[in-house]
Amino acid sequence: MTTIPTTMKGVLLIGHGGPEMLEYRQDIPVPTPKDSEVLIRVSAAGVNNTDINTRIGWYSKNENSSDDESWSGNALSLPRIQGADVCGEIVAVGRLVDSSRIGERVLIEPCLNDINGQTIDPSWYFGSECDGGFAEFTVVSSKHAYKLNSDLSDVELASFPCSYSTAENMLTRSRVTKDDRVLISGASGGVGSAAIQLAKARGASVIAITSPNKNEQVLELGADEVVTRNVNLVEALGENSVDVVIDLVAGDQWPQFLDVLRPKGRYAVSGAIGGAMVKLDVRTLYLKDLSFFGCTVLEPEVFGNLVHHIVKGNIKPLIAKVFPLEEIHQAQEVFQKKGHVGKMVLTLK
């Protein structure tokens, strides 16, 4: 039987600002699972844009940022344990959870619509509206802890939940099939590299946008073509040349995404690292009969499909660098420089 301590090591977000707002502690109380929850000993947790965006208050659109600074737009409660990407082992269960789940190796579905057996709407994000995985232990509704059998390491598995579920959700919402030519922005990042693999798993043709020094790595992931970031997409690809745009960047290049979409094309977005404010000629939208998909809350089938891909070996993890949890400041600083391909992962063992 696993001995569960009363306190644990972890990282608390204590306010908004730089990495100094992340406080590494060794005296955080270990959470107790409620009736429909499981307690998970965390072995590895990925680093994501969501963690940093929440820390700096990027999600807020109001002058009073405390009103809407979480992922869902709700007020953020501090201190908060962040961390949406979690791989670990169930070590205890709540009263209504079958005790046979103890010992299961699990991934946590980060988009939560169940809190202790109660359905919620809008959904929460693990590590935003509730405590996440940047600690030795965490709790989540049993429904959102997915058992899986895989030869991959815990670090490799922790690279999947957030980025790959976001990518799979974008492909699901935009209905990507084997007949589609798909353009992916930010293709070397966690979500972008996941989108390449998952689009190829659907049989689609993939064009990836990345910086010149990452071309070979992106091609190795399965991209059929690579175009350099900041090139004129119309000149490089031609007008009306792609069926779907998977956008993680937005920014100044955004109008060109619509120019290269074919009539009745589909545009899916789940990021804006190049700048959130864009210029839209509404005539392009309606004259080309384009469909837009804002992708935040996961479709019900998405995470289960992702776990299936992992177990079947249809996708592979791409680890850029691994840090111990106590070096989270350095990990996030390296992450923000965007000089890597793939995922940064924190270890807790």
Image (cartoon, rainbow, N blue to C red):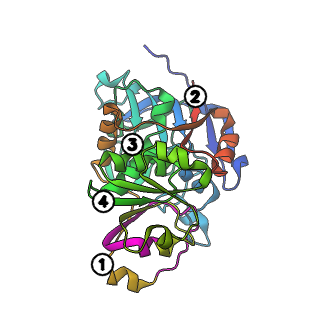
**Which quadrant is home to the C terminus?**
top right
Where residue 289 is drawn, which disc sits there?
1
Above or below, comparing residue 218 to residue 269 in the picture = above
The residue at 27%/55% (across/down) is: 177
Helix, strand or loop under label 1: loop
Is mark 2 in CB contact (under 8 Å) with mark 3?
Answer: no
Earlier sequence position, callout 3 versus callout 1: 3
The magenta region covers 257-280
Residue 180: which numbered mark, if any? 4
Q: SS of the residue at dot 2?
A: loop
Which residue: 49% across, 16% down? Answer: 3
| Residue ID for mark 2 | 348
Q: CA distance from mark 4 to mark 3?
A: 28 Å
Up/down of 128 relative to 103, above or below = below
Which residue of the protein is positioned furthest toward the bottom in this rendering?
283
Residue drawn 45% across and 33% down? Answer: 157
Counting residues from the N terminus, which is met first, the one under dot 1 or under dot 4?
4
The mark found on residue 216 in the picture is none
Q: Quadrant of residue 294?
A: bottom left
